[in-house]
Amino acid sequence: MSLYVPGLSRRTLLATAAGSVLWPAAARALGVASTIRIHDHTSHTRLVVELSENIEFSIFSLADPYRIVADLPELDWTMEGSAQAAPTGVVKAVRYGLFQPGRARIVVDLVDPAGLKNAFVLPATGETPHRFVMDLEKTSREKFLASAGPQHRVGALAATAGKPVPAKAVVEPPARDAKKLIVIDPGHGGVDPGAIGLSGIYEKTLTLAAAKQLKGRLEATGRYRVKLTRERDISLELAERREVARTAAADLFISLHADSMGNKTVRGLSVYTLSEKASDREAEELAEQENSADSIIGVDLSHESQEVRHILVDLAQRESMNLATKLADRLIGELKREATLLRNGHRFARFAVLKSPDVPSVLIEMGYLSNREDEKALKTEAYRGKLMAAVVRGVDTHFGGVQSARKG
Ligand code: ZN
């Protein structure tokens, strides 16, 4: 865990092997990555990943912030604290994890613009395993920008270039039965651990655990069908999360989070809905943090930011926003019986993940992992169970209310 760099945001911390606990037993991993080392040489910075076998790879760079992204086949990450080196040279931080089924990703955050000088795999020799090597050298911003972009693959091994996997979420056609369809979105995942708790627990791990509990409880009522945006420790773009709900014609979208903040005394749960104007400064900061998830997992956003405002203005007129607001109030009504609520339990801001124009969407911050009591509670299945039971009651009231309003 020595890759923590003081002074950087919590999100530049490394993902470690902890998340892989949630992987299904029959992992589809092609090989095992056991160590990441970073060496600063005078002319370049070298990053070395030890591997159980030879792999193909593809590499590209992204600007603002400067990143180098390497895509590899799906790997099991078995990094231990002792097997990692501190960032040095042009490397500010390194994150890694499952990006898509079949595809692992390493995101290298750079201190300064740096280009890829070399990338190759060294074959195993004796005791030494295969090694994936990237050499990065300082460059100018102009040169970096000239070569940056998601489509610019600059390296490959074993005579075959790594092929980009289409970035489409797996979706099913809308079912026709009368049950309401609810999409639950466990926040973060894969390359992006989300917040990191005082005890070292990852937000991505807790959101997935809570999502599975909520799914079980909703299905147990017999009134709902439930779909998760992700079922394992994998990265997902915010647009893909929305797309799961939209394509399946979901009746509700519920995104689960548990973030952290600088003030460790702040605790409590809150429910967020979408709005052009934030309810308060904290809500705005949180939305900014959540919206940066795409850049954390190594997605190019240079083309996207323009659209956001248009969509938001358009959205304001829509019924889904009103429905989301009503749902949020009902959830708050139930959740305050089980948990400490944040002052102004219902808040709003520009959350990209809540932008679906036709699916009422809410985001639940289950608590703060920067607060000792919240973190301790959220780590227990029993406490998460109580919260999720309250969510089920809120959803029940929501649909009960909606249905009777339509009848009346
Ligand atoms: Zn989050």
Image: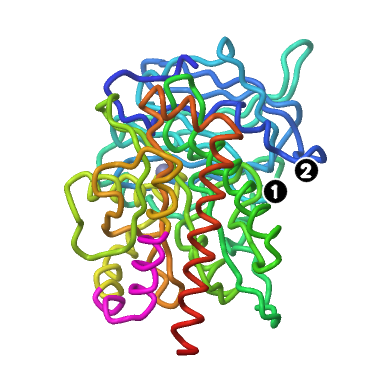
- Measured as percent of width and height from the top left, residue 30 is found at 76, 38
Q: Residue furthest right?
A: 26
> Given contact means CB atoms under 8 Å apart, are the residues at marks 1 and 2 in contact?
yes
- Measured as percent of width and height from the top left, residue 250 is found at 56, 72
Q: Is residue 165 above or below residue 337?
A: below
- Image: magenta residue range: 313-330
Q: Residue at x 61, y 42 (%)?
A: 233
Which colouring convention does the figure follow?
rainbow
**328 magenta-colored:** yes
Residue identifier under label 1: 102
On whether ligand 1 comes within 8 Å of the CB at mark 1, the answer is: no
| Secondary structure state at the residue bearing disc 2 | loop
Nearer to me, 120 or 368: 368
Residue identifier under label 2: 28
Q: Quadrant of residue 369?
A: top left
Q: Residue at x 44, y 15 (%)?
A: 86
**109 magenta-colored:** no
